[in-house]
């Protein structure tokens, strides 16, 4: 229960800081503090009555709810699928890499440094160009390159959003596993006659998870920014559409809170699992 | 001396980018070649702008016939130094916040503050930056007069400080945790026992170990600043302001005041299907700059790691000496230039 209370407090703090930030553009435009405070209060009260919130579509005001719900889940599906896909693919690749001899691993690491330097805009552009090129060559359309109206595309945005996080996770996992395999327990279990792959799968992987958990927050942070770009490039009617349709502080605050909430729960749950495991290990 | 090839390659590429940009300004007076129509030997017009990539013009020309490569070269002297400036400011400010955080805050306050600041993990930087910089950087329209809310220097100042301050909380928690980890080391406890005050511990034991790590943080922050510039460029918020054409029937895209790279991205990325190389030229340059910074980071990491190993080996040797001579032998870290 202590964890739940702590999480609630932290979530409230996040909401408060989001509200405070969302008033800032008013401050920059008008350069007056009282107007800023007024705006902050306005945002705060409008959040208490979410039913009255409106957004602008084709120059007409429409209520934000329930229009907002469907695109929201659409965006969440894209974000979560690519996050999970990236993590597990990276884990598979990392296991494969760790079996390889040292020189090849060094080469792979250098390649990864290069790949992780690719700007995300370049990756998206290459995926787009590749799909069009593939279509011209073979007449097979792998996926639509832009969504029109209410039609939904999944393959391309997920592909775009998976590639870079996959590389980040992959490199981090290889580095962490190498560090682990220099520790005494690795040598000891090898000396006991355990196979390398067994030690890798069951001990090294488990020991890297805590660091990876903290690292994954940074990756997710980066992915939400990417979501904005991907949805804009492929003309997807997702959550960021509302963000960019009009940059009003109220809408901004609502969208940010809605983005933050599921991941807040997700990470709180993971942290809970980790703490249970650590307690078990300490107790045993 | 740093003996890492990666480090020097990275430094060289970055210096070459900025250097060629400066040469282009002072020797060639920022002159950008314009080729609207290409003729063959018989003086027949072969092609009109935008020209495709060639050896002479690696990124081709844009619709108005300007050489894209020259534009990119011209922009390097704004984008890279600004990224470095922002990264330095982030780390320096965060460092000064981290000192009281690590030395004077009790454990519960540190934990609480870390929780509060980590709420920034759920608010992505790009969205915030776009949201906050929109009113500052975009040219406004009131009546039929186009104007900026702020003067040029104010815009630069605000952009730099917003991009700095948004990341300072996360970086200061990171540096603060580095310091607290350092304070748990055995030699710090012994110097405390010997009567060293906080200032002495900080100057003699924390700073020498922390500085190399800070350099690495700076290069990493350079990368993150470059990525933000690219994103902002895509959303047409350029360093120093976005010149929007509000005139009716105006088909000139919003323009950057200088040819810095985020401006080039914003101007040309839309041409991605028609002329991929023109659209991607600036993005590729971003990639090269980011890769160089990453090489510098890796070079520094291997350098400091091998330095630590050498130090460890030295220490073990000395231990053996000690058994032979029986004399006590303190080692002062900053005398051997660690």
Image (cartoon, coloured by chain):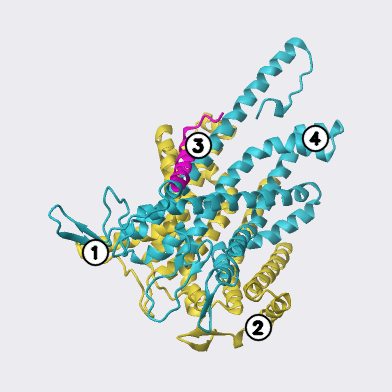
Alpha-carbon distance for marks 2 and 3?
52 Å
The residue under label 2 is: A46
Are the residues flagged by discs 4 and 3 from a single subunit?
A: yes
The residue under label 4 is: B189
Badge nearest the viewer, 1 or 3:
3
| Sooner in the amino-acid sequence: mark 4 or mark 3 | 3
Colour chosen for chain A:
yellow
Q: Nearer the viewer, residue B69 or B295?
A: B69
Q: Secondary structure at mark 3?
A: helix
The residue under label 3 is: B7
Q: Magenta segment, which residues?
A: B1-23
Judged left or right of residue B196, residue B184 is left
Locate residue B9: give its quadrant: top left
Q: Secondary structure at mark 1?
A: helix
Residue B63: x %, y % from top left: 31, 64
**Residue depicted at x 58% and y 73%:** A258
Badge nearest the viewer, 2 or 3:
3
The residue under label 1 is: A135
Q: Residue furthest left?
A: B42
Q: Quadrant of the N terminus of chain B?
A: top right
Q: Chain of mark 1?
A: A
From where the camera sits, is residue A257 visible? yes
Are the residues flagged by discs 1 and 2 from a single subunit?
A: yes
């Amino acid at each position: 229960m202590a964890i739940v209370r702590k999480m609630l407090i932290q979530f409230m703090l996040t909401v408060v800081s989001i509200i405070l930030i969302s008033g800032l553009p008013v401050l920059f435009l008008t350069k007056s503090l009282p107007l800023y405070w007024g705006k902050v209060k306005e945002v705060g009260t409008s959040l208490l009555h979410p039913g009255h919130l409106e957004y602008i579509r084709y120059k007409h005001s429409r209520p934000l709810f329930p229009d907002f719900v469907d695109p929201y889940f659409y965006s969440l599906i894209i974000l979560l699928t690519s996050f999970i896909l990236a993590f597990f693919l990276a884990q598979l690749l990392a296991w494969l890499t760790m079996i390889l001899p040292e020189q090849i691993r060094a080469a792979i690491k250098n390649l990864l440094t290069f790949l992780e330097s690719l700007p995300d805009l370049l990756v998206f552009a290459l995926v787009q160009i590749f799909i069009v090129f593939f279509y011209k060559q073979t007449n097979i359309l792998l996926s639509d390159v832009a969504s029109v109206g209410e039609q939904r595309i999944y393959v391309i945005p997920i592909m775009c959003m998976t590639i870079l996080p996959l590389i980040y996770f992959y490199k981090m996992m290889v580095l962490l596993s190498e560090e682990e395999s220099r520790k005494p327990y690795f040598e000891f279990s090898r000396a006991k006659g355990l196979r390398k792959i067994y030690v890798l799968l069951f001990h090294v992987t488990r020991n890297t998870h805590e660091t990876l958990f903290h690292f994954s927050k940074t990756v997710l942070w980066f992915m939400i920014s990417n979501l904005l770009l991907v949805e804009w490039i492929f003309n997807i009617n997702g959550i960021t559409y509302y963000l960019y349709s009009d940059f009003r502080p109220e809408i901004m605050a609502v969208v940010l809170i809605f983005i933050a909430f599921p991941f807040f729960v997700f990470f709180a749950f993971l942290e809970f699992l980790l703490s249970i495991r650590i307690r078990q290990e300490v107790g045993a | 001396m740093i003996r890492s090839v990666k480090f020097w390659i990275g430094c060289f590429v970055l210096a070459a980018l900025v250097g060629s940009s400066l040469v282009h300004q002072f020797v060639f007076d920022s002159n950008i070649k314009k080729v609207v129509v290409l003729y063959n030997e018989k003086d027949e017009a072969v092609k009109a702008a935008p020209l495709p990539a060639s050896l002479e013009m690696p990124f081709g020309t844009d619709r108005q016939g300007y050489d894209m490569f020259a534009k990119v070269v011209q922009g390097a002297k704004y984008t890279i130094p600004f990224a470095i400036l922002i990264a330095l400011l982030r780390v320096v400010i965060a460092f000064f916040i981290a000192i009281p955080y690590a030395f004077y805050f009790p454990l519960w306050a540190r934990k609480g503050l870390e929780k509060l600041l980590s709420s920034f993990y759920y608010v992505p930087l790009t969205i915030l930056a776009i949201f906050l910089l929109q009113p500052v950087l975009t040219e406004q329209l009131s009546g039929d007069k186009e104007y900026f809310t702020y003067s040029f220097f104010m815009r630069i100042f605000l952009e730099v400080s917003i991009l700095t301050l948004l990341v300072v909380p996360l970086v200061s928690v990171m540096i603060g945790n580095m310091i607290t980890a350092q304070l748990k080391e055995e030699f710090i406890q012994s110097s405390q026992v010997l009567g060293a005050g906080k200032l002495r511990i900080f100057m003699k034991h924390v700073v020498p170990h922390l500085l190399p790590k800070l350099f690495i943080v700076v290069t990493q922050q350079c990368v993150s600043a470059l990525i933000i510039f690219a994103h902002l460029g895509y959303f047409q918020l350029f360093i120093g302001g976005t010149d929007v054409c509000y005139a009716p029937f105006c088909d000139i895209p919003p323009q950057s005041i200088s040819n810095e790279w985020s401006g080039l991205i914003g101007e040309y990325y839309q041409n991605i299907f028609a002329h991929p190389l023109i659209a991607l030229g600036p993005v590729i340059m971003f990639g090269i700059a980011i890769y160089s910074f990453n090489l510098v980071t890796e070079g520094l990491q291997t350098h400091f790691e091998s330095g630590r190993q050498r130090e460890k080996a030295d220490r073990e040797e000395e231990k053996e000496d000690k058994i032979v001579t029986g004399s006590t032998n303190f080692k002062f870290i900053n005398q051997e230039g660690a």
